[in-house]
Image: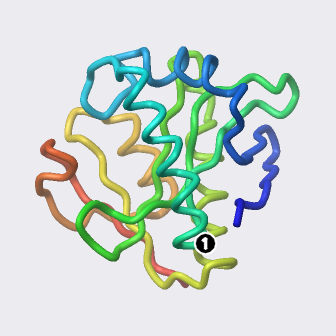
Amino acid sequence: MTGPEINTARLRLRQFRAEDLVPHRAAVDDDPAVTWAHERRPLAASLRSWAERLDEWQRDGFGMWIAEVAATREVIGHCGLQRLEDGDEVEVGYYLGRAAWGQGYATEAARACLAYGFDECGLSSIVAVVRHENAASRHVLEKLGMRAERDGVFYGADATLFRASCR
């Protein structure tokens, strides 16, 4: 199974394709300011992640999409739903390159992902984790109506878990 394509007002969320590797790496994996661990990701790690993202669609019926600007087809990062590490909860995630910051793309993409999770996947709850120092991402989650639930260590970093419930 591959994921459906989702079009928002300004974005196109679609399946990963081989030709996305170079622009995606430039926007996300090669920039320590964008990655979760704040370090450049090696090519092998990027390729493993891509394979895992494709497997998620087969296993769970949801996963990550490439995020591109609809008008230009510029790859700006990725977003979607995945299993929270070591658990059954589903989290929304988004990684957009610096050129896309401050334009409302993260909110637009995450809103579409939440709608997909609730409306198409029938999820009753979706979480998100944000590092404490990432005020911009925290603001995105708050704009989406997600509520801070608890602090903890997620993916090896101190972070806050947010939650949205199906209304």
Between 70 and 141, the residue placed more toward the observer is 70
Relative to 120, residue 41 above or below: above
Q: How many marks?
A: 1
Q: Is residue 151 left or right of residue 163?
A: left
Residue named by callout 1: 61
**SS of the residue under disc 1:** loop
Please state which amino acid type lies under the numbered disc 1.
Answer: Gly
The residue sitting at 35% across, 74% down in the picture is: 89
- Which residue is more in the foreground, 140 or 75? 75
Q: Residues within 10 Å of mark 1 (few under 14, many from 20)?
A: some
Apparent side of residue 3 relative to residue 57 in the rendered image (left or right): right
For residue 113, what is the image quadrant? bottom right
Task: Left or right? Give the position of 24 relative to 90.
Answer: right
Residue 91: x, y in percent? 41, 62
- Where in the figure is residue 164, as x and y percent of width and height? 43, 71
Q: Nearer the viewer, residue 3 or 107?
A: 3
- Residue 24 vertical placement versus 50 (above, below): above
Quarter the N terminus occupies:
bottom right
Residue at the image position 40 percent from the left and 25 percent from the top: 34
Residue 109 is situated, as x and y percent measured from the top left of the image, at 63, 47
Residue 96 vertical placement versus 40 (above, below): below
The residue located at (79%, 54%) in the rendering is 5
x 53%, y 59%: residue: 55
Q: Looking at the image, which residue sits at the far right?
A: 71
Q: Whole-percent x and y of residue 50?
A: 52, 41
In terms of image quadrants, where is residue 70? top right
| Quadrant, the C terminus | bottom right
